[in-house]
Amino acid sequence: MLKNDEVPFYEPMLEKMIKKNKKRLNYDFLSSKLYNDVDVFFIAVGTPEKNDGSADLKYVYEAVDGIIKNITKNTTIVIKSTVPVGTNNKIKEYIRDNLKKFIINVVSNPEFLSQGTAVQDEINPQRIIIGTDSKQAIKTIKDIYKHKDEKYVLTDSNTAELIKYASNSFLALKISYINEVSNLCEKFNANIEDVEKGMKMDKRIGKYFLNAGIGYGGSCFPKDTKALEFMAKSVNSEIQTITATIKVNEKQVTKMLDKARKYYSNFDGLNVAILGITYKPSTDDIRDSPAIINLNKLLEYKTAISVYNPIPIKKLKEIYKDRIKIVNNIAETLKNADICFIFTEWQQIKEMNLKLFEKNMRKPIILDGRNCFELNQIKDYRVIYESIGRKTINNLN
Ligand code: UGA
């Protein structure tokens, strides 16, 4: 696909970028020619979660093996993949044991881009962490990135690796924290939106990653928090705040299903509408998506499920085949539904015509797991509307 200028996943701006730089890009993955005369290798492969929560490094070592076997001169390897603390040093030893002819510098340079804004994040990063003891390698990386000196943090590789896990886990912690506060809001009849607003105005707290919802998902936070917990245990230590973060998230993800039981003690026989299926907006990624966890739970019942997502998700059809109906417009998704779950805050959903609920649903019960609408907006419609950390609107009685 890449050879035909096609990007195998949805990422704003990426296809344009790849087309623009076509002449400078070569995708001969399997050819040993790829390794000829290379000054720097970037390893950016996945490090998926193993059953015990640790990170699987097999793809990283496969990439290292390819380099060891095929290089034609001294070179530098930059590890961008998220790898457990100590991995860069282990890779260095591995190379020393298996390669005698050339010298390879190994540098930890963790990645901080987010899906959906990946291209901008890469072009204009907030910081660049370089973990190495090689002055030459530092110069090589700085020559490539060409950013201002104040953006760099120069350190050893263990520290660089830990910065990555500490950052992702801290963001996850903020999310679990605000989600717990939202649960308190529901008990005290307080409003989480105003709590968030009030907190975000304090610069020491910061305005990001304090949006309550049905928890974090994706290919990074769930895996990296568990990997950090695993790493702590491996050195007879613990990281209790992150253990709590994980536990809170697991419960939060299915919060809307728990709320739905107030209206239906059993979901058998219901028509269910789902708006938003990706783990966040502006991506077609459904890995570890809270929406998918909920969808799988709903499929345990005899429900007829219609799913709308503003951009098509090829994988959805492959995985679920005829078990769900994939619909490309909101009105049709809502047709005759007994309940509607909102799992992702896509702009198209936030801006939808709210009349569609009462117009199309058999029973307009809406469970919004991402607080997509203002209570002031929705209060004028004949619906039941439950969201996160805000009061319930019930205009059906
Ligand atoms: C995350 C980090 O934000 C990046 O800095 C990091 O480079 C990346 O992981 C990685 O390790 O590769 P990403 O997984 O793309 O990026 O997505 P985020 O925007 O961080 O969102 C993660 C999850 O948190 C989503 O499910 C989102 O819905 C949820 N979230 C985010 C909330 O529930 N509330 C918030 O306030 C923010």
Image (spheres, helix red, strand yellow):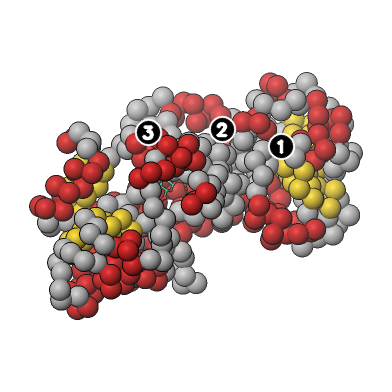
| Proximity of marks 2 and 3: CB atoms separated by less than 8 Å | no
Residue 124: x, y in percent? 33, 34
Residue 312, compared with residue 292, is above or below; it is: above
Question: Is any part of residue 316 visible from this angle?
Answer: yes
Residue at 45% from the left image edge and 48% from the top image edge: 172
Residue 107: x, y in percent? 22, 57
According to the image, label 1 marks what residue? 386
The image quadrant of residue 269 is bottom right
Tell me the CA gap for discs 1 and 3.
28 Å
Residue at 71% from the left image edge and 28% from the top image edge: 352
Q: Looking at the image, which is closer to me, 3 or 286?
A: 3
Say what secondary structure mark 2 lies in: helix
Residue 335: x, y in percent? 86, 39
Q: Looking at the image, which is closer to me, 158 or 34?
A: 34
According to the image, label 2 marks what residue? 192
Residue 205: assigned label: 3
Image check: 361 left or right of 158? right
Q: Given the image, on which type of amino acid does mark 3 rest?
A: Ile
Of mark 2 and mark 3, the one earlier in the sequence is 2
Q: Looking at the image, which is closer to me, 46 or 55?
A: 46
Of mark 1 and mark 2, the one earlier in the sequence is 2
